[in-house]
Amino acid sequence: MGVQESYPIDVEAIRADFPILDRQVGGNVESPGESDDDDQPLYYLDNAATSQTPEPVIETISDYYRNYNANVHRGIHQLSQEASVAYEEAHDTVADFIGADGREEIVFTKNTTESENLVAYAWGLAELGPGDSVVLSEMEHHASLVTWQQIAKRTGAEVRYIRITDDGYLDMDHAAELIDDSTKMVSVVHISNTMGAVNPVSDLADMAHDHDALMFVDGAQSAPTHPVDVQDIDADFFAFSGHKMCGPTGIGVLYGKEHLLESMQPYLYGGEMIRSVTYEDATWEDLPWKFEAGTPSISQGIALAAAIEYLEDIGMASIRDHEELLAEYAYDRLSEFDDVTIYGPPGDDRGGLVAFNVDGVHAHDLSSICNDHGVAIRAGDHCTQPLHDKLGVPASARGSFYIYNTREEIDALVDAVADARDLFA
Ligand code: PLP
């Protein structure tokens, strides 16, 4: 059976675009990137943490440094103008990708975490106070949970958490109880990086807006894997990271409705974000530059646009179908073991990841045995520690899938899990 067998996307052609997938691995981490003779193939199933990078994106970065590396916005010289045009147009590409009205609504940040902090500091510190509430869910990533928790402490606002049902969904009745006239912000993860649940963020946005609250959607796992339209969702803010969607590290996105970004004070101050400065005061640049202080991540922004073009060529709806197919396959295969617990909704109703535990085997041991098989998965709390506390486990193992993954790679994971069971039984 070739890798081509019945996938919604051309996995074989896609795999050929990712040089790292030819890597062999075997435990020698002293010389990064090198392989030994007795190494074995890499099965990369840690995509929810960071995805791999295709040739066109690597080539975009290389082309930038070879041919037009220069600072943006301030230069009259040709290289600076070329870099500025490419960097600014990258904002347009991102805007089109998520259905925003234009580049004014797209702020480049370092990652999802910085996008969350930007809103929490720039909007939250100014707008929240005693008597106000911020509604999160029990499945939030620390990027959102810790950030709003700290801003709430500083402003006297209350943080409320929407419960999770026993089958791993958000309890929408509880959401309706929690979101009330005291609520100023609802911030919920679109696809949980632990449960795999795809949350009804558009319904939550309606609930928030019914109470004049704002809706922040953490799209770190959804933007890479699903078609997203921020206007369909009616999100006020939407955040994601380039490194989870074939782009480089060091680049993230904050989408914000223009009138909201317009009304907010900057989060970082310095060069590039000002219009004029005196010894007494300063005025701010137009959007989105008002929120992009200092020299930005230029090559990373341009390469993010290349990554988006790469994903769009494949088709976001087909990528979602591929993710769902692999998630269901992994869920079904792991369910063959009666001592495996999988967290979150059923296999046929989840995003492309599966977090699980094997009775009597610590997730770190499991991950280490997987590594011996060349299978790269994640073990830990996946930055959802309170959720793991609630699940009653300190950690879980997580396989997460992307456009280049195959059923055979999931079989390799299942073989490694079988080995771990034998070893620890
Ligand atoms: N939110 C979710 C749901 C995530 O999965 C992650 C990363 O794993 C983040 C936020 C934080 O992303 P970053 O580390 O790129 O800021």
Image (spheres, helix red, strand yellow):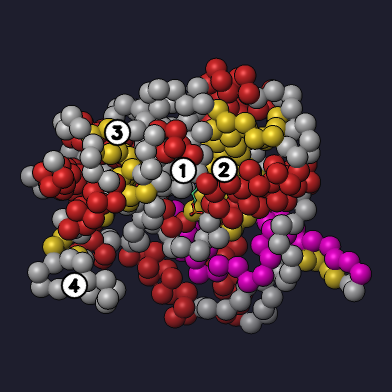
Distance from disc 3 to disc 4, alpha carbons, whole Å, reads 33 Å
Q: Are marks 2 and 4 in contact (CB under 8 Å)?
A: no
404 is higher (above) or lower (below) than 87? above
Q: Which residue is mark 4?
A: 35
Q: Are marks 3 and 1 in contact (CB under 8 Å)?
A: no
The local crowd at label 4, few if under 14, some if 14 to 19, many if 20 or more residues have their Cα within 10 Å, is: some
Image mark for residue 384: 1
Amino acid at circle 4: Ser
Residue 418 is situated, as x and y percent measured from the top left of the image, at 13, 42
Residue 3 is situated, as x and y percent measured from the top left of the image, at 15, 48
Residue 33 is situated, as x and y percent measured from the top left of the image, at 27, 72
Q: Which residue is mark 3?
A: 342
**Going 50% across and 22% down the picture, which residue do you hit?**
171
Mark 2 or 3, nearer chain start = 2
368 is higher (above) or lower (below) than 235? below
Q: Quadrant of residue 28?
A: bottom left
Mark 3 or 1, nearer chain start = 3
What kind of element bears circle 2? helix
Q: Which residue is mark 2?
A: 145
Which portion, as a residue range, is magenta? 280-309
Label 4 CB-ligand 1 distance < 8 A: no
Q: Quadrant of the N terminus?
A: top left
